[in-house]
Image: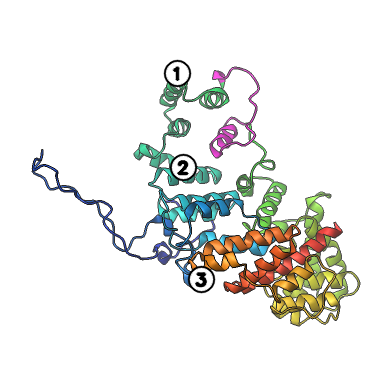
Amino acid sequence: MRQPPGIRHAAALALLWGGASAFAGQALAQAEPVTSSGLPPSVESAPLSEPGVGAAGLLRSGITGLPPTLWKGSDPRSLATLIAAVELPVPALSRLMHTLILAEALPPEGDRQHAFLDSRLDWLMAQGAVDEALALLDITGTDDPRLFSDWVDLSLLVGDSEPVCKKLESQPRLSSDLSLRIFCTARAGDWQRAALILQSAETLGEITGRHAEILRRFLDPDMGDGRTLLPPVRPTPLEFRLFEALGEPLPTAPLPLPFAVLDLAGDNGWRAQIEAAERLARAGSFSPNRLLGLYTLRRPAASGGVWDRVAALQDFEAALERDKDDLIGRALQKVWPQMAHARLLTPFAELFADRLAGRKLDGRAAPMARRALFLSPDYEDLAQKGQDPSREAEFLAAIARGEPPAEGAALPHADAVAQGFGEASVPTVLQAQLKEGRLGEVILRAMALFASGAAGNGQDLSDAIATLRAVGLEDTARRASLELMILDAERALQ
């Protein structure tokens, strides 16, 4: 199976969690001593160490710190609902969610037909994490029709249809999608057979309307009815590729996030690449270092919009190279509002906060640098290097240490956050769920409480922080709290 770009697996990553299993089928005794064959009855079996593809993951328990029984005690339908509905108001929760989804852990009891795995794949795709989803399917395999369908969509998004079509040709049972069969047959060079399949499908009413028109034009531009072909509002990856083949590529900006990966290819314009990368970075599906690489690819030849942001960041990086605090301060005052407007302050802090630590900056640059320190992964260590005696700095430093602040601060959600690190406790209902072994579900519910708190419910925010800390996610609780206060404060200035 193909190895998706940007993802490398160790051989050990393909090993799933071991566990007890039994024969998948048993030969049953005949009701009557009569048989039509002298052959022994067939017995289906599975390796005793194989718990099923539902346990597959890219991150092992030793890396995540999460137990393999993360989901075992929960109802799979409740988990699917929570995964689909959870909102992620800050990057720290997005990182946690990626970890939960990619963790190698046993599926919940009662999971049927890989339904929970489907929920995980759906979430990854919705976030534009196409490479990670493909890597997960590399482990599980795609011999199940539902997993094959996911693989088709993901492969078409990255422009790699050949393996899909080859597998469909050898195992036609994997998909009943006649549009895909027509597409693959044509790509294999058998255009006449593809046209015959389409004609039969139209006669039987299995492909109709606009979709039939797209396929007719794909097979032969002269077969169209001559009318303008309106693009679908929410195209499938296959429809997107069909329009592309017709010479009428659809713009990706108004499309759901997974389509942003299409603009990352080197044959797209630089602006399209940057804008796609920014969309994915906001969802936590594009690394800050890759984003920086795009920002610094060349000097912008225009101004306005994204180009002002690119120029400001390049000037800031140049000021850092010159290592003069006055130049750095002026450059920071230009790039900071640009990154705030793009909702990319956290990736910016991850890239540059360590180089801002200990700088003697004046004016508006000083609080910008301070907030960058608290948004960085090394927030606790970098915060200790600051020499800022302000009430905001002392408040944020206390949260960075995981302590209740001595005094309040003029920051959004400050009181609720302080309560979360002080007297707040895990809600009773979540305590009961923890006792039932529903750890993963409790984490998801804590994230939902955090989102409610971010929208203004202070008690929910305090409860969420207390719960995250109680289950051992101290770093997430601290980073999420710091990000929420700082990023909301910056939004208020926009």
Q: Is residue 252 visible?
A: yes
What separation in Å lies between label 3 and label 1 (alpha carbons)? 55 Å
| Quadrant, the C terminus | bottom right
Q: Please state if 254 lies on the left or on the right of 172 as rendered.
A: right
Query: Which stretch did the figure color magenta?
Result: 222-247
What separation in Å lies between label 2 and label 3 (alpha carbons)? 30 Å
Amino acid tagged 3: Ile
Residue at the far right: name it: 363
Pointer 1 and pointer 2: residues touching (CB < 8 Å)?
no
* Residue 448 image-quadrant placement: bottom right
Density class for disc 1 (Cα within 10 Å; few <14, some 14-19, many ≥20) is few
**Colour mode of the rendering:** rainbow
What residue is drawn where x is 81% and y is 72%?
369
The image shows residue 489 at horizontal and vertical percentages of 82, 63
Density class for disc 3 (Cα within 10 Å; few <14, some 14-19, many ≥20) is few
Density class for disc 2 (Cα within 10 Å; few <14, some 14-19, many ≥20) is some
What separation in Å lies between label 1 and label 2 (alpha carbons)? 25 Å
Q: Is residue 116 above or below residue 146?
A: below
Amino acid tagged 2: Ser
Pointer 3 and pointer 1: residues touching (CB < 8 Å)?
no
* Residue to which mark 2 is pinned: 149
Q: Is residue 447 above or below residue 167?
A: below
Name the mark on residue 63. 3
